[in-house]
Amino acid sequence: MPARRPSASLRCLSATLAFALLGGCGDEAPREEQKPRVFVQQVEVAPHEASATLTGDVQARVQTQLSFRVGGKIIERLVEVGDSVSANQVLARLDPQDQRNNVAAAEAAADAERARLKQAEADLWRQQKLLPKGYTSRSEYDSALAAQRSAKNSLAAAEAQLASAREQLSYTDLVAEADGVITARQAEVGQVVQATAPIFGLARDGERDAVFNVYESLVAPPDEAVEVALLDNPAVKARGRVREVTPTVSAQSGTVQVKIALENVPDGMPLGATVTARIAADERSSVVLPWSALTKKESRPAVWRVGADGKAELQEVQVARYATGEVVIADGLQSGARVVIAGGQLLHPGQQVEIAEQEQKP
């Protein structure tokens, strides 16, 4: 039997239901975008004393790198790191065979020039005896005189070459320039080294410095008195004055190096000892925030600030210094501003945020 086709009334009813369903979907309200929750801290600008207890070490005022003045193979090393050495003490030796051969060749050349000079002087003496009697010509006398002078100059050059060869031979022994302590070693026995390559580091005996890496805001003025104490035993102290401050800031740490010239260093504060010192600067109006508040805008430090409309904006700031767990802001924020201290990792400028209440500490 042929299939029955749906009636016109049934088709009309189906179309009406479909339009009703579509209309119901269109009336559904859009879902509201979820706001990120952040913790904020209200900024308070207050006087802040930029002070810190710094840790450094005791170093020699004069430190030098010792190296051979000729190249060769190291056949002997006589000292270790930490050894005390005296001036002119031999520290290491190179294989001297090449230099000995040069000395032998220079000695032979000098002997040959001595013989040539002796012959030239004999010829000149004969010409001096024959010339007054007319048994020789003036030109022959002049030739003998020139030959004698040439031989004399050649001998002087050969003797200079011999002296240089002997000096090069002496350079195969590496000696200490002054009394001190070996602080570093960069080569071993059997290694072939080039001339001037560092072999040992030498800290000379004498004046001592306490060296610290300091944030620029904490740099004490030159000649200011500073008390330095031994880290392991604070009772061992020495006084000193700021002697030198590096003119550039380290790109890695953001610090400058300060050297304090120590006076009357006690026996319990040897070379390399770890020491501490407290350095304080003048009070400045600044803001203290936790590390988590700091971010960056391009390559400059910044923080997320929440405005009165609840939107986050990126605010550039000037950092005075970094401390343990906190950062000191010198400029860029005013009292009353709200700064995001947690939850700002995924924020973008102009984004609406929800401020979460922090738990009150008991």
Image (spheres, rainbow, N blue to C red):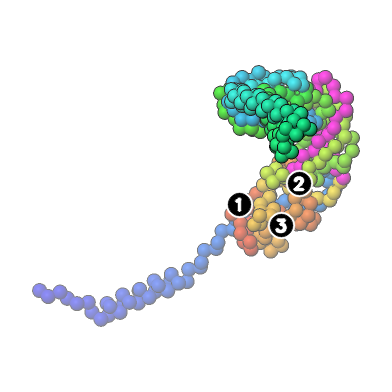
- Height in image: 78 above or below 2? above
Which residue is identified by label 3?
Answer: 316
Q: Which residue is mark 1?
A: 345
- Seen at 81% across and 20% down, the residue is 268
Quadrant of the image occupied by residue 231? top right
Q: Amino acid at mark 2?
A: Thr
Measure the C-alpha gap from mark 2 to mark 3: 24 Å
Spatial CA distance of label 1 from label 2 is: 33 Å
Q: In x, y percent, where is residue 271?
A: 77, 25
* Magenta highlight: main SS: strand
* Neighbour tally class for label 2: few under 14, some 14-19, many 20 plus, Cα within 10 Å: few
Decide: is 144 above or below 78.
below
Give the magenta part as a residue range: 255-282
Nearer to us in this view, 83 or 13 = 83
Task: Identify the residue at image location x=63%, y=24%.
Answer: 108
Image coordinates of residue 345 in percent, x first then y, are: 61, 52
The answer to whether marks 1 and 2 mark residues whose Cβ atoms lie closer than 8 Å is no
User: Closer to us: mark 3 or mark 1?
Assistant: 3
Q: CA distance from mark 3 to mark 1?
A: 16 Å
